């Protein structure tokens, strides 16, 4: 297993009192012809809140960009910290399949949302002045544009990772990244080199009540 290097000085702040540090498995995704690295989640999705657990784009939303390029990344040994193992193959085929499934599903959601718009009658403008009720067609359009924006976001993220026409043009390998969990604020950081990366999406998605015991019982 390859462990991404972190600066020891970070552990004083991020692995000290009221924090929990542990390794997780991710897929390192390096788009062909580029220096950038993205870390694709293979572990934390298991500890998501119930409203997110069945979302096909969950692992994409839990992925993040490395602050270092492929040439700048260094590696280290595991050391003293516990480790949550991947529950997926965490290889190129796995990442590619996950992205394809997510885009296909969100595309179907867009189609279904548009069908609802077409089937919803428009409330005449004069009637809305008499009865200030909700315009169901406007609401349906709002839902449609919300799903469409979500699809655009997923497609954009996938494109940055090198996903083109159902194929992932990237070099992928499984690695481990050291995570820091602030127990008081439920904030997660990825400790990479000398740069702690605050993972904003994780705070909303992760169920910390299930994550913390899992880490405590891991080896």
Image (cartoon, rainbow, N blue to C red):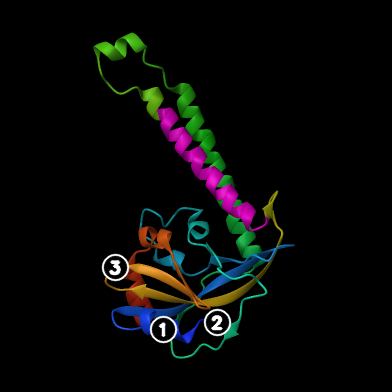
Instruction: Report the side of 138 relative to 92 (left or right).
Output: left
- In depth, the one of 181 and 47 nearer the eye is 181
Is any atom of residue 1 visible in this view? no
Quarter occupied by residue 200: bottom left
Residue 172, position as x, y percentages in the image: 66, 68
Magenta range is: 140-162
Q: Residue at x 58, y 76 (%)?
A: 175
Q: Which residue is mark 3?
A: 185
The mark nearer the N terminus, 2 or 1, is: 2
Badge 1 marks a residue whose secondary structure is: helix
Q: Which residue is mark 2?
A: 5
Extreme residue toward the right, this view: 33
Q: Which residue is mark 1?
A: 11
Crowding near pointer 3: few (<14 within 10 Å), some, many (20+)? Answer: few
Asked if residue 157 lies in the magenta stretch, the reply is yes
Badge 3 marks a residue whose secondary structure is: loop
Q: Residue at x 50, y 30 (%)?
A: 114
- Spatial CA span between label 2 and label 1: 12 Å
Up the image or down, 197 lies above or below 132; here it is: below
- Spatial CA span between label 3 and label 2: 25 Å
- In depth, the one of 191 and 206 nearer the eye is 191
Residue 194, position as x, y percentages in the image: 50, 78
């Amino acid at each position: 297993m390859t462990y991404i290097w972190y600066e020891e000085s970070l552990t004083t702040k991020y692995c000290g009192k009221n924090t929990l540090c542990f390794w997780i498995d991710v897929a390192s995704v390096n788009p062909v012809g580029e220096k950038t690295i993205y870390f694709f989640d293979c572990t934390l999705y298991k500890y998501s809140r119930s409203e997110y657990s069945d979302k096909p784009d969950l692992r994409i939303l839990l992925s993040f960009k490395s602050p270092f390029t492929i040439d700048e990344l260094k590696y280290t040994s595991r050391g003293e910290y516990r480790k949550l193992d991947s529950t997926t193959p965490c290889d190129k085929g796995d990442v590619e399949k996950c992205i394809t499934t997510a885009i296909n599903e969100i595309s179907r959601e867009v189609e279904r949302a548009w069908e609802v718009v077409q089937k919803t009658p428009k409330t005449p403008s004069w009637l809305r002045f008499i009865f200030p009720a909700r315009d169901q067609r406007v609401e349906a359009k709002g839902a449609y544009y919300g799903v469409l924006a979500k699809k655009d976001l997923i497609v954009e993220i996938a494109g940055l990772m090198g996903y083109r026409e159902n194929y992932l043009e990237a070099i992928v390998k499984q690695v481990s990244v050291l995570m820091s969990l602030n127990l008081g604020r439920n904030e997660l950081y990825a400790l990479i080199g000398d740069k702690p990366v605050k993972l904003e999406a994780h705070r909303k998605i992760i169920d910390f009540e299930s994550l913390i015991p899992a880490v405590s019982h891991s080896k």
